[in-house]
Amino acid sequence: MKKLIIFIFLTSNYGFTQFATVDSYFKISKTQGGFLGSLDNDDIFGNPECIGDLNNDGIDDFAIAAPGDDDGGTNKGAVWVLFMKNDFSVDSYQKISNTQGNFTGSLDNDDLIGVAISNLGDINSDGINDIAVGTWSDDDGGVNSGAVWVMFLDNDGTVKSHQKISATQGGLVGLTANRHFGRGICSLGDLDNDGVTDIAVGSPAYDDDGGLYKGCVWVLFLNSDGTVKSQQKINDYHGNFGYLLDDEDRFGYSLANIGDIDNDGVIDIAVGSKEDDDGGLNTGAVYIMNLNVDGTVKSSQKISALEGGFVGLIQAEDNFGFDVSGIGDIDGDMVNDIAVSAPFDDDGGNNIGAVWVILINPDGTTKDYTKISYTYGNFNGALDIEDAFGVNISCSGDINNDGYIDLLVSATNDDDGGNNIGATWILSLNTNLSSLNSLNRDVITILPNPTHEKINISIKKFNGNIKIETYDIIGNKLQTTNETTISLRDYSKGIYILRVAYGDIVEEVKVIKN
């Protein structure tokens, strides 16, 4: 039996297309990448998030957390805003903490601010993207109840204003002690079409609905000031989830916006359940969840060692689903795909870590996959035992405009410059993005591409109605129009997808703004 299992493993890993191997990589740490900020032992610098072009220099910027930072006390945490160069190195930075960055919110010891970060877009309409930051050990309303800070940023990376969402602030109802609310956060776009971005927040600890560490997800409909207008809870008792959770599954440990994979006009999400026991203790799982506009679940599909058509080798204690990220439609089948981390994978050594890039079918099952680790995926970066590569992952689109999807991967236990200081890897993935340009060139023309500002679309021998939708690389719908000239002037540099519908034909094309 052992020989058979090994044979299947080798066949599945070498027999698949290897569509998302690493073309190049860059590391940001205390000793590499041009970052000169002060990092100390146990800061666990990682958890990266692309926050768009904050300072208007034409290059997307990052927010990277250090939840173990001791500014103002022990483990209060911090968020570093990194202003980037085109070569992925750091040009300058701004720290947001208990003592820096004009953040005046009250942080306590062991709050661990930055354990989750999500780019919210510009929710207060001031032209600058805003972020949501988790403090899963905040004690508002009870020990380890958790909280989320909505931070309205200035273009220098400082905080203009903020709003806390917790058991006692921000309009959230029903949060109690030991929930670890804020461990996972993702933007949902404007789910209820009121003009304000909404969010999903994971609470992967105690639950008062009949379980211990089962976990849950809160869908929060926000006001423009960052407070909660209304809410919807999702677990095996609420929200029409459809699956039974077990104690200590930690459902909601990670969350990701994966765009509209079922094409119903509503954003869908992926939810990590890192200690699910399918296939072994704490092997882990991810749920693909199609949402309704009210935040309930329309349908869901589990991906694990036993379900969802995934046959890659994940083992006990891998914690598959520790983090998850949407990565856009990288194979051009009109279904967005995902990256899933397994930071305690043992490829090459104990707990070195791994990331799985998974192609998704329309029903949420697995079409194909590639593994990126110490031994797979053409990644040759220096990883050490216990680095936990993949604790946090985030797709940043095509940052340097080279046609490759860029994936941010943290290794929070990396020892560059000291013990558990942490690091973030930027991986340029060799994906076949050209498949998105498979339209009939004798019928439709889209020029110029790449563009600095405008795209002109012409369709031969068709005089009917044309509908054009613009999406970012992770599937967020940005605009809909019937005009054949599309302006990208107000968008950050990177890859966008145009979905062009004319007659009964729908074509998709990749557009690059440089």
Image: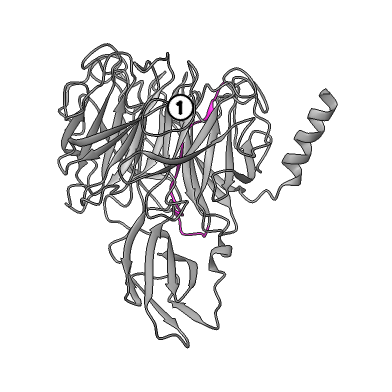
Q: Is residue 9 left or right of residue 452?
A: right
Tell me the amino acid under the disc marked 1. Answer: Gly
Q: Nearer the viewer, residue 114 or 259?
A: 259
Residue 379 appearing in the image = no
The image shows residue 445 at horizontal and vertical percentages of 47, 79
Q: Viewed as shown, does residue 49 lie left or right of 226? A: right
Residue corresponding to mark 1: 422
Q: Name the residue: 57% across, 49% down.
A: 361
The percent position of residue 164, horizontal first and vertical second, equals 19, 29
Residue 376's spot in the image, x, y percent? 68, 38
The verdict on residue 394 being magenta is yes
Q: Report the coloring of the rendering.
A: one colour
Residue 128 visible somewhere in the drawing: yes
- Which residue is drawn at the image coordinates 45% and 22% (left, top)? 250
As drawn, is 218 to the left or to the right of 441? Answer: left
Instruction: Please state, as top left, top right, bottom left or bottom right, where the C terminus lies in the image.
Output: bottom left
Of residues 112 and 506, which is closer to you in this image? 506
